[in-house]
Image (cartoon, rainbow, N blue to C red):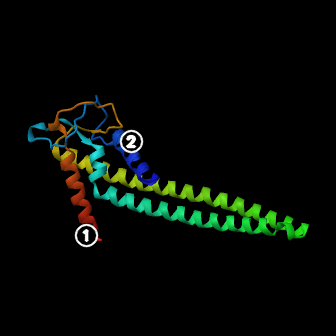
Amino acid sequence: MNKAHIFTKLTLAILIAGSITACKQGPTTPAATAPVAASADNKNAIVFINSDSLSKNYAYVKDMDKRLTTKSDAAKADLQSKGEAFQREVADYQKAANTMPADQRQTTEQRLQREQQQLQSYQQNAAAEVQNEQSVEMGKLYDKISDFIKSYAKEKGYKMVLTYSKNNTSMLYGDQSLDVTADVVKRLNDAYAKDGASK
């Protein structure tokens, strides 16, 4: 599993666990493990979503992972290519150094030192760019889910929507009738498919 994929999953769980609510945070409700849609008599209830299941089954998250992985892999390949080219230059210099005049050796060493610094700077910038792209994507994901949950809670009459994750131990048990994950994932995927079809 690559680092971008791990980052996406962990950050998604943290964002969802801390933020997706239909109103102000109240007392926490424990969680269950199997997604079962809340029944009609749960109006005005506090319900929850299994964020692990959501991140695994929401098509938008899968596509986002692919986009981030593609960009991360491209950046790694580019850096590897530049690094290998630099190593070849260093190796060529080391082979020829003994036959070079002193001034040429000094000039070459200075040039290689500049190139090494430029490569390090390029690596730092590339890493920052990938990290920024991840942050932007996570922001879009959060907005998309948060907006949906607000509308969903209003439609269903739920006063609060909590989340459960194996990484979030504040919820240990909950009645399965309060788990709305399956319905939320289905609706999110339907909306995402509709958005994709309209583009």
Residue matched to label 2: 14
Q: What secondary structure is marked by label 2?
A: helix
Q: Nearer the viewer, residue 21 or 17?
A: 17
Checking the image for residue 197, the label placed there is 1
Bin the neighbour count of mark 1 within 10 Å (Cα to Cα): few under 14, some 14-19, many 20 and up: few
**Residue 20 appears anywhere in the view:** yes
Image quadrant where one finds the C terminus: bottom left
Q: Of the two numbered discs 1 and 2 on the same chain, state the one appearing first in sequence.
A: 2
Asked if marks 1 and 2 touch (Cβ < 8 Å), the reply is no
Three-letter residue code for mark 2: Ile
**Residue 44 appears anywhere in the view:** no
Bin the neighbour count of mark 2 within 10 Å (Cα to Cα): few under 14, some 14-19, many 20 and up: some
Q: What residue appears at the point 32 percent right and 37 percent down from the top-left corner?
A: 166
* The quadrant where residue 121 appears: bottom right
Q: What residue appears at the point 58 percent right and 63 percent down from the top-left corner?
A: 80
Q: Residue furthest left?
A: 41
Three-letter residue code for mark 1: Ala
In this rendering, would 113 be left or right of 82? right
